Image (tube, helix red, strand yellow):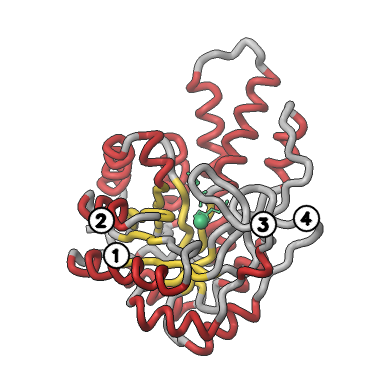
Amino acid sequence: MPLVGTKKMFQMAYKNGYAIGAFNVNNMEITQGIVEAVAEEQAPLILQISKGAREYAKMSYLRGIIDVAVKENPGIPIVIHLDHGDTFELCKQCVDDGYTSVMVDASHEPYEDNIKLTRKVVEYAHSKGVVVEAELGQLGGIEEHVKGVDDVAAHLTDPNQAVDFIKRSGCDSLALAIGTSHGAYKFKAAPMLAFDVIEKIHKLMPGFPLVMHGSSSVLQEFKDLINKYGGKMPDAMGVPEEAITKASKMGVCKVNIDTDLRMALTAKIRQVFAEKPGEFDPRKYLGPGREAIKKMVKHKLHVLGCAGKAAECL
Ligand code: G3H
Ligand code: 13P
Ligand code: ZN
């Protein structure tokens, strides 16, 4: 029964000093690329679905694709997770749809309101056996449905407040703001991450699973291909992979990656179009895109340290 919640995964990840990759899915090729990678590397997996992904692909289609992945890979524990749920209704809908984990993100609300909404989602989700991730502090960057703050350094998670938040909200894991942003433009000059925030919460709440959002690395290979073949992302900058590995040994059990998937797919499609301007068979450009995602995810699983850990998380 490999469709699972995050409890066992996070216990093992915490104890053994690695993190689980949480990859955003929006269509079949992205999902297949990720799933083929974890199957080859025997890694546990969190597939996460944003509100935008639900609207774009229609949940029933995404669910169908994921159900096939689960059925074909009985040795891989797979979590279906809601990414950045912004209302009680959406979180409830996802619990009712059979997600095994939901994130309620009320981090932009005043502190007491964040606790109140998180608590409400926790009460419903727990009554159905579903785990809840919450967020305290705010990230930067902009995605379709996730608007961040401009000044990330002023919105970092407060470690003492995090202890109070976890106790009063009852959440199962907490997403921290440590200076990352969503998207491909995370830092203006050089990466700056508040490891002291992770360290303090790690000490104050031993055993409690932490989550890092905005954790794509903006890989040079894909940035170069995009810029070479007609794209324009010259100043894109991500989180260094060494920082991800370091965090995975400090209680960070879940690392969110979307931008690196988008860039891998986009880079390969651009390359095919540039090299074969007459190409119009979607399989001929989506196929290489899927292959690039697979290769990139396989590499990430080693950065996260979760390659080979599927069996212990079952
Ligand atoms: O955290 C944001 C994810 O990258 C999802 O982005 O809302 O554009 O699907 P999205
Ligand atoms: P990236 O934009 O860095 O991939 O972050 C994704 C994310 O945090 C999804 O919740
Ligand atoms: Zn996020």
Checking the image for residue 92, the label placed there is 2
The quadrant the C terminus occupies is: bottom left
Specify whether tag 3 is near ligand 2 (CB below 8 Å): no
Whichever of labels 2 and 4 marks the residue nearer the N terminus, that label is 2
Whichever of labels 1 and 4 marks the residue nearer the N terminus, that label is 1
Front residue of 169/262: it is 169
**Residue 225 visible somewhere in the drawing:** yes
Tell me the SS state at disc 4. Answer: loop
For discs 3 and 2, the disc positioned in front in the rendered view: 3
The reply to whether the C-beta atoms of the residues labelled 2 and 4 are less than 8 Å apart is: no
Look at label 1 and name its amino acid: Val
* Residue in the picture at 66% in, 61% down: 241
Label 3: which residue? 150
Tell me the SS state at disc 3. Answer: loop
* Residue in the picture at 28% in, 61% down: 4
The reply to whether the C-beta atoms of the residues labelled 1 and 3 are less than 8 Å apart is: no
Label 4: which residue? 188
Checking the image for residue 237, the label placed there is none
**Alpha carbons under labels 2 and 4: distance apart:** 38 Å
Give x and y (percent) for residue 156. 61, 71
Checking the image for residue 121, the label placed there is 1
The reply to whether the C-beta atoms of the residues labelled 3 and 4 are less than 8 Å apart is: no
Look at label 4 and name its amino acid: Lys
For discs 3 and 4, the disc positioned in front in the rendered view: 3
Look at label 2 and name its amino acid: Lys
Specify whether tag 1 is near ligand 3 (CB below 8 Å): no
**Residue 78 visible somewhere in the drawing:** no
